[in-house]
Amino acid sequence: MNRFGSAQERIQQLRDEIDRHNQLYYVLDDPQIPDSEYDRLLRELQGLEAEHPELITPDSPTQRVGGTPLKAFNQVQHRLPMLSLDNAFSEEEFASFARRVKERLGSDSEIRFCVEPKLDGLAVSLRYEVGILVQAATRGDGSQGEDVTHNVRTIPSIPLRLLGEDWPQILEVRGEVFMPKAGFERFNQQARRLGEKEFVNPRNAAAGSLRQLDPQITATRPLDMFCYGFGEIEGGNLAQSHSASIGRLKQWGLRTSPELKTLTNLEQCASYFEQIAARRDGLKYDIDGVVFKVDSLADQEQLGFVARSPRWAIARKFPAQEELTTVESIEFQVGRTGAITPVARLKPVFVGGVTVSNATLHNMDEVAKKDIRVGDTVFVRRAGDVIPEVVRVLVERRAGDVAPVQLPAHCPECNSDIIKPEGEAVARCSGGLYCSAQRKQAIKHFASRRAMDIEGLGDKLVDVIVDNGMVQDLAGIYSLSHAQYAGLERMGDKSAENLIQALEKSKHTTLARFLYALGIREVGEVTAAALASHFCKLEAVKQAESNDLSTIEGIGPIMAEHIIAFFRQSHNLEVIQKLLDVGVHWDEVEAPAVETQILSGKSFVITGTLSRPRSEIKDELQAMGAKVVGSVSKKTDYLLAGSDAGSKLAKAQGLGITVLDEDGLRWLLDSF
Ligand code: 5U1
């Protein structure tokens, strides 16, 4: 050990360096060495400790995962109770809380609040003595929790030893242990692959992971922690305000919320709440509201607490995203391509900010897997703009003998046979355009904005013209007269006139839009555009063979089969001919000259929250010749990442792919 002095000195150097890089990586989000370099430091430390086991200390970064599983959890008495928060469910309730705070403090001026999102995880208290993590405990009943030190030590972002030296001799820190959404998805994917039990949500996953007797298991779970409060403090001080005290935690290597802010009036508080609510789905972790704390620690002390909640803090909650309700019936809907989708009709329930009375059950495999039956009490979830879903059944509330749901033998709309090919999850009505439900969906898709863009031909109108037997196929919409449209319920002369004009206008389209509008199974806009620019002529697309199609990026064998099958059906060819006969046409497609396409051959992935809709940016990139695909791979040239970019960003960084923000993209385009 000449180069580094004694082994002991080098061990200490390595530990300091590793701890510093942990802080840079986990707390400051500013990694300064590649993972390989970090691993090298850790391996060197492991090697030296193996040579000198007498120098191993429990706070060494090599000692996160303990050896033997526990037999049971010990109880921990919290020296200061772990408080819970009162809730406010509206702006008015929050305003009353702020008013009460002002009255109690006898203050005329605005109160300064320290605010941050409320994580949906598990509250944990960490105890550091002389800078070393000595105990971690769950909240339990607030007075007594369980000792989970062995598991908490495995969470890489929690320091085993605080950085710096100015920490109190005894420092209890409270916060939330959580599983980030991406880690949760990854964990459940793996559980599915291995046929193991999945977790219902990230909160349960975090709780289940901390309640393991064997820390080796916890060590495999992607857990993290944000610290937000304090317990016992002795032999040192924090700061004058809550926000500054949280800032000190950060300096000592603990992770705190990156969204933490201090605000000085009610409008700012309301606006922060709205902004966080709007960004909720894009955050990397689940939250269920926003916590507001009086920032001055002196004011906190003066306000004190009642029962188990401080008078100086409140959680303003988002509307619940999960509620219980009952399944009143299960019906079957027919989609554009004949797919039969079971739908649960629910007793209306207010969840995620709206009243929900229907939830898609996706397919019969899903119904069987979740064992959903009529009359069941179920958890319904609606998060953000996501379609409501039945998460699980409360089987213990099932009344008596209710039979499992059966797939009907015949289409509920046209009575044609329902066919479920072996090994496929989706059952389909075999009626094709004879089935009025399929005809309606096909026309709605044909008329939609990104297809033929027929303004005024809305869903209700399509239902009426199909139900009245006025159109038998896509071309039928062009054959109805002004008088026929004007004669329909709620369609005046003027609306019919506008509709006829819109129909006329739609006849001049592009080959790409036309191919998309035909509704070929699995052919979305990107594939339709690729087909148009590859084949240039409709006739060539119609004749395409599987070996031609498979040379096009994004078209796999199954999609190729759907395309070929579509153009082999004589009734599809007849409809296409009728559309051409009524005057649908497009400008000749010219294969773009390579030099005019500045992004030709470049592959992009778009992720995160951007300043404009993704579809708009995607259209622009495609217009410049780029391919825009959904997932990052070695073939990706650029990742365009907005805020809150998640696993795609991490993957791109791991693969050394160029990551651009919106300014970076502009710069790139300007540079051509
Ligand atoms: N973000 C945050 N969550 N949370 C939960 N802050 C916060 N503060 C809490 C709780 C129970 O309690 C304070 C009284 C420290």
Image (spheres, rainbow, N blue to C red):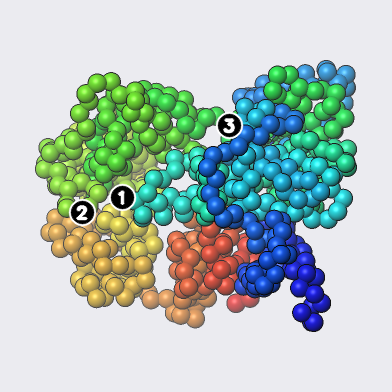
Q: Secondary structure at mark 2?
A: loop
Tell me if mark 3 has few (under 14), some (14-19) or many (20+) residues whose alpha carbon lies within 10 angstroms of its own. Answer: many
Which amino acid type is marked by label 1? Phe
Label 3 – label 2 distance at C-alpha: 41 Å
Q: Which mark is residue 318?
A: 3
Residue ID for mark 2? 423
> Is any part of residue 25 visible from this angle?
no
- Give me the residue at 28% from left, 35% from top: 371
Using the rendered image of the protein, determine whether residue 629 is visible from the camera's viewpoint. yes
Report x, y in % for residue 265.
79, 31
For marks 3 and 1 on the same chain, the one whose residue lies earlier in the sequence: 3
Question: Is ligand 1 within 8 Å of the beta carbon of the residue shown at mark 3?
Answer: no
Residue in the picture at 27% in, 30% down: 373
Q: Is residue 108 left or right of residue 385?
A: right
Task: Point out the quarter of the image occupied by ligand 1.
Answer: top right
* Mark 2 Cβ inside 8 Å of ligand 1: no
Q: Residue at x 25, y 32 (%)?
A: 331
Question: Is residue 290 positioned above or below 447 on the image?
Answer: above
94 lies above or below 612: above
Q: Circle 1 — which element?
A: helix
The earlier-in-sequence mark between 3 and 2 is 3
Q: Which residue is mark 1?
A: 446
The kind of residue on which mark 3 rests is: Phe
**Cα gap from disc 3 to disc 1, whole angstroms:** 38 Å
- The crowd level at tag 2 (other Cα within 10 Å; few <14, some 14-19, many 20+) is few
Instruction: Give the numbered dot on residue 305.
Output: none
Secondary structure under tag 3 reads loop
Amino acid type at circle 2 is Gly
Specify the quadrant of the image occupied by residue 266. Answer: top right
The mark lying in front, picked from 2 and 1, is 2
**Nearer the viewer's eye, disc 3 or disc 1?**
3
